[in-house]
């Protein structure tokens, strides 16, 4: 008894572990958003753009850097003038230096300039072949300002490019999400359609088997000709072949769904859905307006135009007159004792204005500017062309939506009528009032009615989903 209980428990556990998972469309979309390759790639791209912008913003804040040479050693043979002999002579000269440096830097985004505060202290041992080692110390604190003039503001442009890249990444993430939702929805409904077509094929086989069995009995009783029974036998073989094809199609559609949604490729599952026709009002003008306002491609094209405008300005600035203003004020001290280098400082001042005038570069900058301007015109052309492509896409999807809607309305009652016609024909065949050919024709019509009605409804649902993807607007709840 205990052995039977153990065997039963093992069988129950095995069944629970290997039970087929039932997936709904909502579960599939939620899982895909969390696990699919497309969304994970979009998330990483978005995170990269966010971190890049944050890095640039933090780079505009005050930074502090500390350096230390511990030690810095140099030894070389150098030529120096000897006053005693009035000639140049070579001497072995070297030094060992221990130095620490501290840099405090503050970029100024509005002017493209930089303020910096620098402090350094070092101790140095100097030696040569003709004298003993000498030690001295040095301290320095200086405030520096560097300001480019008449040129391109690289700091501001760098931040603007990072902001544009982040905006594009956010929009691309939204587009990837919409594309993924549609892809999962489409592959889910293809699985559902293949499942229903498999059920229709099984039902057709069952009906054909009943028809063939009835015909066989009537043939034995001498009520019908042998050719009618043979025809139904051929129909039975054909329906079984269609069943095999439907089964293969069902398995292939399941694999495509697993790949699109990110589920494990070896998952054993079934789909569950309650689909029905729910009228959705979509107007072509409104759909086009939503698309022109929301579509990622159009907004990204505007960002690309700004990118190229920045490139034109940056390239053109390289061929113009530019200036550089540098100013430095500091205090420093050198002494043989370390304690004496921190008081009684000497001043260190400097101001310089450098003017750079491009004179001749064989037209290199002019050609680079023309290339940048051509890229700008290309970006503008792409933006205009994208509007035309988008309008055509909306028109195509709307036509698909209207056609599917009309098919659903026409075929909504066809299955019920075809089923009634087949049931009546089956009874008439049993009574001997019609031939097997007539019965086969009614069965074909019933199968086609079921398949056409299912296909029309799924095409309608997918056309609405595609319209929501193409417009980034929700027409359904």
Image (cartoon, grey):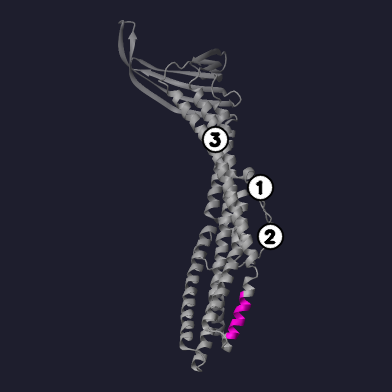
Mark 1 or 3, which is nearer the eye? 1
Which quadrant is home to the N terminus? Answer: bottom right
Looking at the image, can residue 128 be seen?
yes
Q: Position of residue 16 (x, y in %)?
A: 57, 73
Looking at the image, can residue 22 be seen?
no
The residue under label 1 is 285
Left or right position of 275 against 342: right
Distance between the alpha carbons at the discs numbered 2 and 1: 18 Å
Residue situated furthest bottom in the rendering: 221
Which residues are drawn in magenta? 418-428
Residue in the picture at 48% in, 19% down: 137
Distance between the alpha carbons at the discs numbered 2 and 3: 39 Å
The residue under label 3 is 380
The dominant secondary structure in magenta is helix
Q: Earlier in the sequence, mark 2 or mark 1?
A: 2
Alpha-carbon neighbours of circle 2 within 10 Å: few (<14), some, or many (≥20)? few
The residue under label 2 is 279
Q: Secondary structure at mark 2?
A: loop
Nearer to me, 159 or 413: 413
């Amino acid at each position: 008894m205990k052995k039977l209980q153990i065997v039963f428990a093992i069988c129950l556990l095995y069944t629970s572990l290997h039970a087929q998972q039932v997936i709904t469309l909502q579960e599939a979309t939620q899982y895909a958003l969390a696990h699919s390759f497309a969304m994970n790639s979009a998330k990483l791209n978005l995170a990269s753009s966010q971190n890049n912008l944050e890095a640039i913003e933090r780079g505009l804040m005050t930074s502090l850097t500390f350096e230390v040479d511990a030690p810095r050693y140099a030894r070389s043979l150098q030529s120096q003038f000897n006053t005693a002999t009035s000639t140049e002579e070579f001497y072995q000269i070297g030094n060992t230096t221990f130095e620490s440096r501290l840099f405090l830097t503050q970029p100024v985004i509005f002017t493209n300039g930089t303020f910096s505060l620098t402090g350094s202290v070092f101790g140095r041992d100097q030696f040569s072949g003709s004298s003993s080692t000498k030690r001295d110390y040095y301290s320095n604190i200086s405030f520096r300002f560097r300001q480019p003039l008449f040129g391109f503001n690289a700091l501001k442009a760098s931040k603007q490019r990072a902001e544009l890249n982040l905006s594009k990444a956010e929009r691309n993430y939204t587009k990837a999400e919409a594309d993924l939702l549609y892809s999962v929805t489409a592959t889910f409904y293809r699985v559902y359609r293949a499942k229903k077509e498999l059920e229709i094929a099984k039902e057709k086989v069952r009906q054909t088997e009943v028809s063939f069995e009835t015909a066989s009995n009537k043939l034995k009783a001498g009520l019908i000709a042998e050719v009618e029974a043979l025809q139904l036998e051929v129909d039975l073989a054909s329906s079984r072949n269609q069943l095999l094809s439907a089964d293969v199609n069902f398995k292939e559609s399941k694999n495509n769904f697993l790949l699109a949604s990110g589920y494990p490729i070896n998952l054993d599952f079934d789909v569950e859905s309650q689909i029905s026709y729910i009228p959705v009002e979509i107007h072509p003008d409104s759909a086009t307006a939503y698309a022109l306002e929301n579509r990622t491609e159009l907004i990204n094209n505007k960002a690309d135009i700004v990118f190229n405008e920045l490139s034109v300005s940056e390239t053109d600035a390289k061929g113009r007159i530019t200036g550089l203003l540098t100013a430095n004020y500091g205090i420093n001290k050198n002494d043989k004792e370390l304690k004496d280098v921190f008081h009684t400082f000497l001043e260190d001042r400097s101001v310089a204005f450098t003017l750079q005038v491009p004179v001749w570069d064989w037209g290199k900058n002019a050609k680079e500017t023309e290339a940048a301007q051509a890229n700008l015109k290309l970006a503008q052309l792409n933006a205009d062309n994208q509007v035309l492509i988008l309008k055509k896409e909306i028109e195509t999807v709307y036509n698909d939506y209207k056609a599917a809607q009309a098919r659903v309305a026409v075929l909504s009652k066809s299955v019920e009528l075809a089923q009634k016609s087949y049931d009546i024909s089956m009874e008439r065949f049993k009574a001997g009032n019609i031939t097997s050919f007539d019965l086969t024709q009614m069965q074909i019509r019933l199968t086609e009615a079921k398949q056409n009605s299912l296909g029309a409804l799924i095409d309608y649902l997918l056309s609405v989903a595609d319209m929501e993807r193409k417009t980034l607007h929700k027409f359904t709840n």
